[in-house]
Amino acid sequence: MAREDSVWQDSGGPGDGEGGPDDDVPFRRVAAALRERIAAGMSPGDRVPSVRALVGEFGVASATASRAVALLRDEGLVETLPRVGTVVAARPVRRRPARRAAGAAPDREAVVALAVDLADADGLAGVSMRRIAGELGLATMSLYGAVRGKDDLVGAMLDHVFAAEPEPDLGPAAGWRERLRAGARRQWAVYGRHPWAARAISLHRPQPLPALFALAEWDLSALELVEPDPERRLDLHIVLVGYVRGMAITLAAEREAEADTGLDADSWTDRDPGVNRALARHAGPALHRVGPYAYDLERVFATGLDRLLDGIGSAGLT
């Protein structure tokens, strides 16, 4: 299916006014259908269809569905609740973004902070230059005086969220293991608050960001205490960052699935007959010996981090 719009396309964003010749824009058609359902009798707190469900129902791209939901959120008709999803808002009051005087230059910090808020609520698919401009009461092109484009904006967003999570204050006596653990935990905390950030960071083509250089400096200074080879130290830093990032992407996907289904991973597995049939048919004796399993990504993350640090320590002693 051809995609009807782009995350960064600057035509017909949620900041536009209602009505007029843009009524046939796909995301507006989806928003109109949802608006009718809400008016027909949905109550505050009722869940509205997820982005995934809207894609299947209307045959649109996920970005289109996200923009439809974002438009209703701007109108105050729906709100997003952590671990619940998007629901009908209790009091439908249209949001009024703070506007600047005509001709006023956009503020980079305000642009970046707003982009982070939008990404936290809707993912990166909910962020566009046009939407940000509409929220701030600016012409879209004026934003390019504050950010140079998509890559610059996403990089500034990453710097913003990592700067808000202070480096651990461990003191000079802290050993390499304590330092590496604290650095990994700091990244995990950032990704927990901003799930989109894990997908935005690239390990194979690193972005030239102060936040990423700071991550490298933290790990490498700790690794100097246990690993004598400089190349291997950088290898291990990439392994650590990659582990945290990979687990964070899994965490973000699970949160999205919980919002879509209303079920956590354990509940979903218990209620899915296909999984239970497959376990009965295909699971080997080792898997059966595990017995009942409580799926807890926080515990899995801690277990993996411990074993990874064990390996670094063992290799450093040989």
Image (spheres, grey):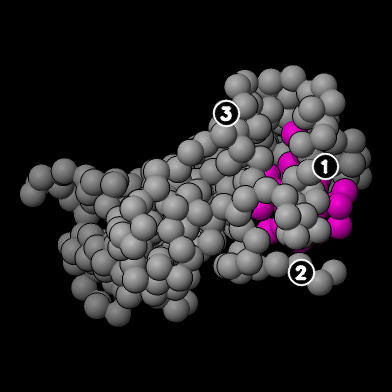
Across and down, in percent, residue 163 comes to 27, 52
Across and down, in percent, residue 67 comes to 66, 52
Question: Dot 3: what SS?
Answer: loop
Is residue 53 shown in magenta? yes
Question: Dot 2: what SS?
Answer: loop
In the rendered structure, the answer to whether residue 31 lies left or right of residue 296 reads right
Q: Nearer the viewer, mark 3 or mark 1?
A: 3
**Observer-nearest of 208 and 217:** 208
Work out whether 302 lies above or below 271.
Answer: below
Query: Residue 3: which disc?
Result: 2
Q: Nearer the viewer, mark 2 or mark 1?
A: 1
Q: CA distance from mark 3 to mark 1?
A: 19 Å
Q: Which residue is mark 3?
A: 93
Q: Amino acid at mark 2?
A: Arg
The tag earlier along the polypeptide, 3 or 1, is 1
Residue found at x 68% / y 28%: 88
How many residues crowd around disc 2 within 10 Å: few (fewer than 14), some, or many (20 or more)? few
Q: Which residues are magenta?
A: 48-69
Is residue 49 shown in magenta? yes
The tag earlier along the polypeptide, 2 or 1, is 2
Q: CA distance from mark 2 to mark 1?
A: 20 Å
**Observer-nearest of 69 and 206:** 69
State which quadrant residue 213 falls in: bottom left
Residue found at x 29% / y 46%: 165
Q: Amino acid at mark 1?
A: Ala
Q: Which residue is mark 1?
A: 33
Work out whether 243 lies above or below 39.
Answer: below
**Could you tell me if the residues under marks 3 and 1 are in contact, i.e. CB atoms within 8 Å?**
no
**Observer-nearest of 174 and 312:** 174
Residue found at x 34% / y 71%: 145
